[in-house]
């Protein structure tokens, strides 16, 4: 059961996490969560490690569903280049992502 989209629900936060010795910025404004990696290469490398682990793939699927139910969107980017999208706005990209994962695994 998701929330009513008409309900006012917004989050605001800024934080910095250290991931493998690199700073990762997380900015949340309204219904958008933006995770910025220090470089495209480090972000893709980390994402590929996650996708190689079936437990993390399952967790990402659960996160995607939870974000969608809350009408939130998570963007992962390096600079202005977005390379991952989960949640509400990610619905249109799921088919392409699932096809890409199937090709990568098979």
Image (spheres, rainbow, N blue to C red):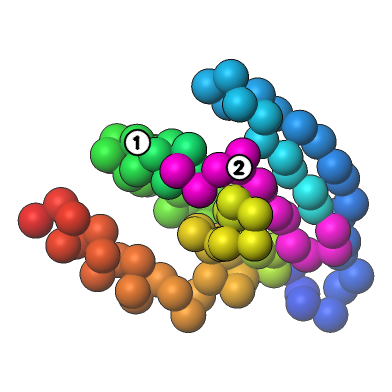
Distance of label 1 from label 2 (alpha carbons): 15 Å
User: Residue beneath label 2, please?
Assistant: 37
Stretch of the chain drawn in magenta: 29-41
Residue in the image at 61% along x and 39% along y = 38
User: Mark 1 or 2, which is nearer the eye?
Assistant: 2
37 to 31, vertically: above or below: above
**Residue 27 in sight:** yes
Mark 1 touches mark 2? (CB < 8 Å)? no
The label shown at residue 49 is: 1
Q: Quadrant of the N terminus?
A: bottom right
Examine the structure image and report whether residue 55 is included in the region drawn in magenta.
no
* Residue 8 higher or lower than 29, as above or below: below
Query: Is 32 one of the magenta-colored residues?
Result: yes
Q: Kindly identify the residue that appears in the image at 85 percent across and 42 percent down.
A: 14
Residue lying at 89% horizontally and 52% vertically, measured from the top left: 12
The quadrant where residue 104 appears? bottom left
- Nearer-the-camera pick, 93 or 5: 93
> x%, y% of residue 35?
66, 48
Instruction: Residue at 81% x, 36% y: name it.
Output: 15
């Amino acid at each position: 059961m998701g929330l009513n989209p008409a309900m006012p629900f917004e989050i605001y936060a800024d934080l910095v996490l250290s991931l493998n010795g690199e700073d990762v910025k997380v900015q949340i404004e309204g219904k958008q969560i933006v995770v910025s990696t220090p470089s495209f290469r480090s972000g893709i490398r980390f994402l590929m490690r996650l996708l190689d682990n079936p437990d993390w793939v399952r967790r990402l699927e659960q996160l995607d569903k939870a974000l969608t139910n809350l009408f939130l969107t998570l963007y992962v980017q390096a600079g202005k280049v977005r390379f991952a999208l989960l949640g509400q706005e990610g619905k249109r990209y799921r088919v392409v992502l699932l096809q890409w994962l199937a090709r990568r695994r098979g």
